[in-house]
Amino acid sequence: MRILTVLTYYRPHTSGLTIYAERLAKALVQRGHEVTVLTSQFEKELPLEEVQDGVRIRRVPVALRISKGVIMPSLGRVAWEETRKHDALLLHLPQFDAAGLAIRGWLLKKPTVIIYHSDLILSSGLFNRFVNFVINFMNDMAARFTHRISSYTEDFASHSPYLRRFVHKVRVISPAVELPPADAGAADAFAAAHNPAGRRPVIAMATRFAAEKGVEVLLQALPKVLEKFPDAQVWFAGQYKDVLGEEEYAQRLFPLIAEYEKAGQWKFLGTLPMKDMPSFYQGLDLLVVPSTNSTETFGFVQIEAMMNGKPVVASALPGVRQPVRMSGMGLVSPVGDADALAANMIEVLSNPGTYRGDADALRAEFSPQTCAARHEALFEEIAREVGK
């Protein structure tokens, strides 16, 4: 099967969405399909066309940026050209351009599936409200013309205003999550480099430094945790400088974080390469996911931590709370409640043996091959319906 995958940003851009899209594309290739990724040339030095891991990538030049979105005048022409050449379409939303692709798939009777990653919630302001309205309208149009919509969890699907309108099209497919195997020597070296004093426990976040990630909730909870565990240290893995749209948020929180840094209680690790992530997880005692709004719908890092035997405290957002619920490896906290977050962190850190789970079962359920096989079956089901 020739599958056209379309999303605004693809690798080397780093986000949960792009990582998932890359893993799924590679797994589909490994299962014998031809996969093309149609995406933006969001950085001018990126080639317009290349092949990575068997996946063909075609990038469309960007003429203008609006908020986190991009305008690509030649996309319409390229989309027609690529849609005609492929047997099925896989669209990643939210995405402004998805409606046009879904309509093309409908007109050409190409099985079309949307993977819906999150609701879109931009910051306040008249312009952002307008952008939010336009993108939501286009996403709504895309759903009307697509054949199926893939959601990470039933929990999120039943709470999303978007997905509830198209419940008859929704199918739940666990996302693709994988890590290279942990190496004891590399983990020891990583810990020696980033925690030479051997501070314990190590509490971690693995994400971008952004308002919806709930960094300030962790900061508000930290004093109570430090009362119980005065030698604790926070590791923050991910982009924390020059995060698009988060400059004001960073300026507000960085002075407090600087005080924790001086005391050896906070360390920024930066964006870690995937090969270092197993060592990162081996070096921590608790992962915290204190996300605050429905732009967060799961949190792949939770599964990654659990695959390494590490517990999680996650916020009670639909979807985000599911990894803890399904595995028993941690606790769920009310959204934005710093006192509850502190209490749950203290409980899990005090009783780690209570929050162990089946890492092998998680690896099987979230394997990219499992995810690819389920989407493949979805395309075949649609093809039978449309007579392809």
Image (cartoon, rainbow, N blue to C red):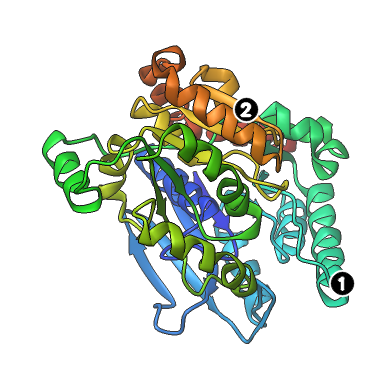
Q: Residue at x 65, y 68 (%)?
A: 80
Q: Which residue is mark 1?
A: 130
Against 66, residue 346 (above or below) is above
Q: Is residue 320 above or below residue 359?
A: below
Which residue is nearer to you in this view: 22 or 266? 266
The Cα–Cα distance between marks 2 and 1, rounded to whole angstroms, is 34 Å
- For the question of whether residue 141 can be seen, the reply is yes
Frontmost of labels 2 and 1 is 2
Decide if residue 191 is on the left or right side of residue 54: left
Q: Image point 40% across, 15% down: which residue?
A: 358
The residue under label 2 is 332
Residue 378's tag is none
- Give coordinates of residue 157: x percent, y percent: 75, 34
Q: Amino acid at mark 1?
A: Phe
Left or right for 164, reference 96:
right
148 to the left or right of 232: right
SS category of the residue bearing label 1: helix
In this view, 28 is above or below 99: above
Q: Compare marks 2 and 1 and give the one earlier in the sequence.
A: 1
Return the residue found at the far left: 185
